[in-house]
Image (cartoon, rainbow, N blue to C red):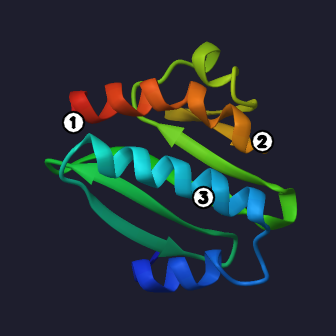
Amino acid sequence: MAASSVDEFDDRLNSAECDSRIRAIVGALRSHVDGCGPVTWLAHKSKSGWGIRASAAGRIVCHIDPKPRGGCVDVQIMEAEPDDLAKAGAVHLRKNAPPWVHVADPGVVAVLLPLVSSAYATA
């Protein structure tokens, strides 16, 4: 994946490409991560998608990849278990990689926040 700027990520997120639900999900997650302590945000893009990741002390805390066509945001939280992620949406398992969850409802983001806090503390 190619590097991108956080400003470019924000411009795309705030464009007509993304609806208010996607912006609310991304906003809630980013605000929570920022509230955990010092964090570095890195954006990326490729032909198949785009997103942003948070890291603390050089370790990744989470990935947040908006999927406007799918009407959701894909979220990967380090150290999170599939059963915990399933409370927020459909879980996607990848071989030799942490699981992702497809979050379509801003109302369920709250169940992910303790997982993000835990991932931040581990980092």
As shown in the figure, which amino acid type bears the numbered disc 2? Asp
Q: Nearer the viewer, residue 50 or 95?
A: 50
Q: Secondary structure at mark 3?
A: strand
Q: Which residue is mark 2?
A: 105
Q: Position of residue 59 (x, y in %)?
A: 23, 45
Q: Image height check: is 60 above or below 92?
A: below
Q: Which residue is mark 1?
A: 123
Q: Position of residue 35 (x, y in %)?
A: 30, 46
Real-space Cα distance between discs 2 and 3? Answer: 15 Å
The image quarter in which residue 106 lies? top right
Of circles 1 and 2, the one toward us is 2
Whether residue 4 is visible: no
Q: Is residue 31 shown left or right of residue 101?
A: left
Q: Is residue 5 shown left or right of residue 1?
A: left
Dot 3 surroundings within 10 Å: few (below 14), some, or many (20 or more)? many
Q: Image height check: is 101 above or below 58?
A: above
Q: Contact (CB < 8 A) between labels 2 and 3?
A: no
As shown in the figure, which amino acid type bears the numbered disc 1? Ala
Dot 1 surroundings within 10 Å: few (below 14), some, or many (20 or more)? some
As shown in the figure, which amino acid type bears the numbered disc 3? Asp
Whichever of labels 1 and 3 marks the residue nearer the N terminus, that label is 3
Q: Which residue is mark 3?
A: 65
Q: Position of residue 103 (x, y in %)?
A: 72, 42
Real-space Cα distance between discs 1 and 3? Answer: 20 Å
**Identity of the residue drawn at 61% across and 24% down:** 85
